[in-house]
Amino acid sequence: MAGRRMEFGPFTWTAGEHSPAFRFRHALADDPMLDLEAIALLADRLRPDLIETAASDRGRVEAGFRPVTWPGPGASSAVRSVAERRLWVAISSIEEDPLYRGWIGELFGEFRAAAGIASTAVGQPEGYLFVSAANTTVPFHVDHENNLFFQVRGRKQFTVGYFADEARKSTAFEGMYSGEYGAVDHEPVGLVTHDLQPGSGLFIGPDCVHSVATEGELSISLSLVWGTPVLRRYAKVYAVNHHLRRLGLDPRAPGRSTAIDASKAAAATARRGLRSLTERRAR
C-alpha cells in the first residue's frame, strides 16, 4: 500500500505529454468528503463559475460540445437533482475550499511518494468532482493534464485512446487553447475500455483522448490533475500555433525544437502581459 488510501502496481510517469495509462486501487468510496450531500454543500461554497453542467444524453462524438457554466448561487440544487434532471455536473478547483485544500494535498502527496516525483517537478494539483446521472455519456475529448481519476460511486466505462496522427492532435490542442472545450470529432486509435467500479482508479496522460460512460446508476468521481513546466510551455506553443495557422501558415508542433518552442512561449507570455497592461489602463 502506497500511503493509506491508494494501492499501486508497477507504473511509469514522465513530465512530458505522454505517460501510459495505468490502473490502481483506492479507499475513497466511503470517504465522507465525497458523499453526495457533502459535494452539494461544497458546490454552494464555491464560485458559480467553477460549476459546469450538461445534459446527460450525449452519445455522439461532437467537436462543438461545451458544458454550461452555472449562472449563480444555489449550485447544490443541480448536484442533488442530477438523476431527476438527467444532468452531469463538473465542479472544478475544489482545493479553493478550505475543507478540501489539505485533503487534496494529502492525496497528491501519496501519489508523488509512490511515483518518486519531487515536489518541484510538478505543479500544485487541482481537484475536480463529477456527479453524473445514470447512462451519461461524455464525448471523446482531451484535457492536456495528468489525470489521476478515482471512481467513488456507481460504475463507469472509461475509454482511452490516442490521436491517429500529429495533425489531428495539433488541431485538438490548438483549438482547446483558443477557447474550445477540447472535444474531438473523430474516433481515436488504440482504444482500451476500463470498467471502473467504486474503489477503482485510472491514471491517464496529457495526450490521451478519452470518453466516459456512466452505467445504470448515479456516479460520483474525483480527478486530481496537475501540470508540469513542459506542459505549460507546450500550452503556449499550441496557442501561438493556433494564430499562425489562421494566417495560413503550417507551424511546427511543440517538442520538435526547443529553441522554437522557447521563442513561441516567450511571445505568448509577452502578448498576455501586454493585454493585461492594456486592460489595467482601460480601467
Image (spheres, rainbow, N blue to C red):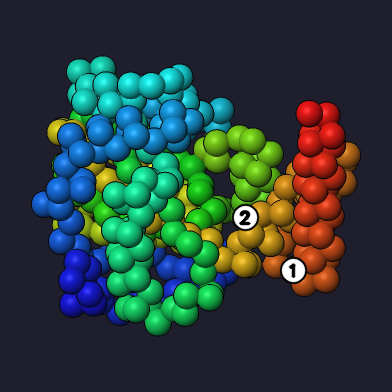
Q: Nearer the viewer, residue 248 or 17?
A: 17
Determine which of the numbered discs, if any, sits on residue 165 in the image: 2
Is the residue 143 above or below the residue 81 in the image? Answer: below
Mark 1–mark 2 Cα distance, whole angstroms, equals: 15 Å
Q: Residue at x 26, y 17 (%)?
A: 85
In the drawing, what numbered circle is on residue 256? 1
Q: Residue at x 68, y 39 (%)?
A: 178
Mark 1, other Cα within 10 Å: few <14 / some 14–19 / many ≥20: few
For numbered disc 2, what is the local secondary structure?
A: loop
Q: Residue at x 19, y 63 (%)?
A: 26
Amino acid on which disc 1 is placed: Arg
Residue 123 horizontal/vertical position (percent): 52, 64
| Image: 202 above or below 50 | below
In this rendering, position of residue 222 left or right of residue 32: right
User: In the orientation shown, which residue stands out farthest toward the left?
Assistant: 30
Q: Amino acid at mark 2?
A: Asp
Tell me the quarter of the image containing the N terminus. bottom left
